[in-house]
């Protein structure tokens, strides 16, 4: 009865208490959901600095070049001979050039950028199918995003030779996890220390897209890719679910139906990179809003089931990054492609050589001058 009397005689105070209580309840519910979701995210050991030191201490270069590495997918070979062959082919095809200068990056101070490595893995979990480096300059509000080709031929500290970048996710037995070795290879190529890493399982990624309500794909003609299980029967823009979106971003041999005949179209890594980035931006836009507490719970659960974070992440860091970049658009992110040339190694592997130093390419979107 006293409560009723209070409401009757103090309506504004009662309304304020009701609103405050409701808001507090929602905030508590959201905080609980975020904590619960973060607790479900798998963590991976990640200390590239310690791993680099361990590799350099334990590694025997003579053994690596002897060709007896039993767990190596790519045979060891004479590094000096390979370098000479690469330089000769570059000189013959593109003029004078140095592979070393482009494959090993000029060191860039750790304090210039906060760096995040986003890795999408294939079904095995040991090869990186998608590698995206996101950089947040400390003196510029606009972030930078660059997709690193998985076939980029860069220095592998563990094997003491050049390998495809995506092979780094296999790790260095006993001294470095897959994420640590991949980060080290990215650091050696770019010259930028990697601060954090997130690994996305593509099956979980498809589920996340479904929970987010799908993504939009735009095509000029019906498109298919038998190996990727892609089948888009209609041209134009269309909303697709997770399974189709996953096939879209992984397609390497697409065909389009033009004038009644199926024709092969460009299926390079760069096309795939554009598709991958486009899907990520769409998900970021969708993540900026949610219609109900239930939809928030679904999205957090989907993220937790598809993402593995490195062990250095804290809850406040993860939430802070997610909040800062919610709804981020393509126009607010500086992007640039990696310049490469095709190359066949002495053991027959088709790879991509870095054609320009990373810092030179980064300079097209970021000013390294003191006043920049």
Image (tube, rainbow, N blue to C red):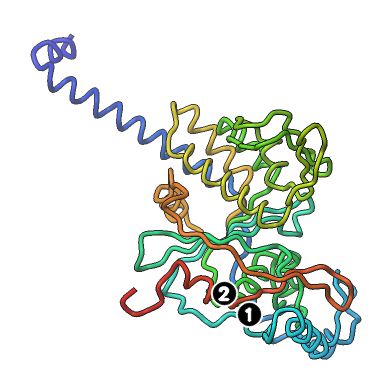
Report the front residue among 155 and 6.
Answer: 155
Q: Residue at x 50, y 29 (%)?
A: 295
Position of residue 7 relative to residue 185, above or below, is above
Which residue matches tag 2? 358
Residue 88, numbered circle: none
Q: State the separation of the CA atoms marked 2 and 1.
A: 7 Å
Measuring from the top left, give residue 272's x and y in whole percent: 67, 51
Q: Quadrant of the C terminus?
A: bottom left
Which residue matches tag 1? 102
Mark 1 crowdedness (10 Å alpha carbons): few <14, some 14-19, many ≥20: many
Measuring from the top left, give residue 142's x and y in whole percent: 39, 59
Mark 2 crowdedness (10 Å alpha carbons): few <14, some 14-19, many ≥20: many
Say whether residue 305 is left or right of residue 143.
right
Q: Residue at x 57, y 50 (%)?
A: 277
Q: Quadrant of the N terminus?
A: top left
Q: Are marks 2 and 1 in contact (CB under 8 Å)?
A: yes
Position of residue 114 relative to residue 368, above or below, is above
Q: Within the image, what quadrant is residue 31 found in? A: top left
Position of residue 69 relative to residue 301, above or below, is below
């Amino acid at each position: 009865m006293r409560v009723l009397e209070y409401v009757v005689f103090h309506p504004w105070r009662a309304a304020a208490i009701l609103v405050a209580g409701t808001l507090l309840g929602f905030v508590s519910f959201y905080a609980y959901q975020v904590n619960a979701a973060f607790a479900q995210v798998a963590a991976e050991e990640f200390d590239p600095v310690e791993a680099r030191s361990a590799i350099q201490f334990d590694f025997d270069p003579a053994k690596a070049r002897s060709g007896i590495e039993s767990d190596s997918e790519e045979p060891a070979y004479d590094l000096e001979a390979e370098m000479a062959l690469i330089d000769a082919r570059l000189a013959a095809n593109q003029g004078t050039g140095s592979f070393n200068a482009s494959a090993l990056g000029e060191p860039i101070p750790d304090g210039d950028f906060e760096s995040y490595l986003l890795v999408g893995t294939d079904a095995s979990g040991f090869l990186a199918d998608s590698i995206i480096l996101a950089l947040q300059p400390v003196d510029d509000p606009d972030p930078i995003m660059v997709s690193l080709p998985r076939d980029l031929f860069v220095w592998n500290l563990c094997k003491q030779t050049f390998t495809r970048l995506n092979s780094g996710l296999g790790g260095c037995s006993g001294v470095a996890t897959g994420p640590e070795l991949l980060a080290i290879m990215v650091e050696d190529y770019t010259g930028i220390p990697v601060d954090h890493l997130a690994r996305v399982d593509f099956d979980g990624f498809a589920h996340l897209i479904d929970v987010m309500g799908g993504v939009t794909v735009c095509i000029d003609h019906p498109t298919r890719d038998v190996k990727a299980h892609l089948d888009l029967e209609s041209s134009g823009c269309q909303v697709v679910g997770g399974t189709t979106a996953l096939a879209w971003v992984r397609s390497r041999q697409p065909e389009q139906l033009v004038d009644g005949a199926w024709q092969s179209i460009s299926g390079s890594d760069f096309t795939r990179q554009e598709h991958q980035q486009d899907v990520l931006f769409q998900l970021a836009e969708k993540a900026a809003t949610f219609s109900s507490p239930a939809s928030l719970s679904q999205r957090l659960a989907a993220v937790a089931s598809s993402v593995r974070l490195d062990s250095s992440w804290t809850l406040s860091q993860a939430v802070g990054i997610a909040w800062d970049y919610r709804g981020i658009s393509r126009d607010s992110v500086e992007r640039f492609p990696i310049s490469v040339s095709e190359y066949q190694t002495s053991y027959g592997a088709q790879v991509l050589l870095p054609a320009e130093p990373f810092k030179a390419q980064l300079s097209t979107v970021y000013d390294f001058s003191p006043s920049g």
